[in-house]
Image: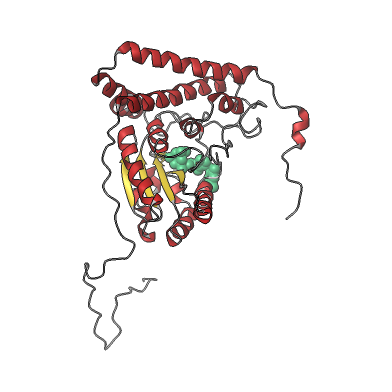
Amino acid sequence: MTFLAKPTTPRRGKAAAPAPAAEATPLPNRERPPEPARYEASQEELLAFYREMLLIRRFEERAGQLYGLGLIGGFCHLYIGQEAVAVGLQSALEVGKDSVITGYRDHGHMLAYGIDPKVIMAELTGREAGISRGKGGSMHMFSTEHRFYGGHGIVGAQVSLGTGLAFGHKYSNDGGVAMAYFGDGAANQGQVYESFNMAELWKLPIIFVIENNQYAMGTSVNRSSAEDQLYRRGDSFRIPGLQVDGMDVLAVRGAANVAVDWVRSGKGPILLELKTYRYRGHSMSDPAKYRSREEVQAVRDKSDPIEGVKRELEALGVGEDALKDIDKEIRKIVSDAAEFAETSPEPPLSDLYTDVLVETY
Ligand SMILES: Cc1ncc(C[n+]2csc(CCOP(=O)(O)OP(=O)(O)O)c2C)c(N)n1
Ligand SMILES: [Mg+2]
């Protein structure tokens, strides 16, 4: 028994309607963005990408240590392995003009948007000097000044909020675009598709970014997704999608340029699927039994984003000493941030009563 009538079944006595010729009516709004090329970075730009990715890597390693020491409480999701995504994409945005929003794995996106590592680390350790005054922690950090809008713990929620941010850009005609990041797991949430529909219908300036790191907690993407080519997820809404090597910062930046041009010129949303990988567990409390050590090691060996850029820099003639100096400089920034976070005061007890919503709606 079937419960869905086949739409093409002819009624008795009537001839079946001829099948429409595939090329007869080109769908409106179906212009394709150009195929992105790998970005041709100057040596200076490549060094900046290297520095930023290394900052995220070392920052996250230190956050992991502070967590182990009990200095960071609650949830903590590290971005190690995915650095090329935030760095490559956000290098094509304008801080303070374009909005960025993401989920709970958010430290790297903040660092890539130029937010001070000290106030991020202080937030992780719950200090008053933290970017959310110590009340948000790892998953809830914001900087409206930079137009970084969090930091969200509800899987997929940031996609709807990001669509609202894009609506804001369009409504106020400020020339900005919104970038909304979400994971392969979040890509199966219903509100994502309500957002896609509205975004395309209203031609909102938004770049939807699926960070496909292959796992949603312990579930691999092919175990949970009927369509695991996630860049196609916008098809039903006429949103064009591109699949990008998220372990190659220059490929990411090349795709970012195409996406930014597309949305800034009023063509509506675009979807990017970044194929990437997280090296650590889902959060600090994940023993990662759903994959083998060899699997992780193989990705690290073959496609580590930082090692990749390091090799390109060496090929350009940047010497070992120069790279070591950068490493030292980054280690110092991270140590200073950790020192700041460990030594600055916790919020006073009276802060328990501030920032609390008391009105009724
Ligand atoms: C609505 C909702 N459902 C479930 C959860 C629990 N949860 C937290 S993270 C996560 C996995 C999401 O995976 P993915 O979107 O791939 O992002 P990643 O962690 O890989 O960055 C789940 C199911 C949640 N926070 N919110
Ligand atoms: Mg994932």
Residue 78 pos. (x, y %)? 48, 30
Relative to 79, does residue 269 appear above or below in the rendering? below
What residue do we see at 27% from left, 37% from top? 38
* Residue 181 picture location, percent across and down: 45, 43
Q: Report the quarter where the N terminus lies.
A: bottom left
Q: Position of residue 349 (x, y in %)?
A: 77, 28
Identify whether 7 is placed above or below 312: below
Toward the viewer: 246 or 252?
Answer: 252
Whether residue 294 is visible: no
Q: Residue at x 34, y 62 (%)?
A: 29
Q: How is the image coloured?
A: secondary structure
Residue 316: in sight, yes or no?
A: yes
Front residue of this view, candidates 2 and 163: 163
Q: Which quadrant holds residue 303?
A: top left
Closer to the camera in the image, 327 or 349: 327
Q: Position of residue 91 (x, y in %)?
A: 40, 35
Instruction: Determine which quarter of the picture holds residue 256.
Output: top left
Task: State left or right for residue 324 relative to residue 114.
Answer: left
Residue at image position (45%, 26%) is 56
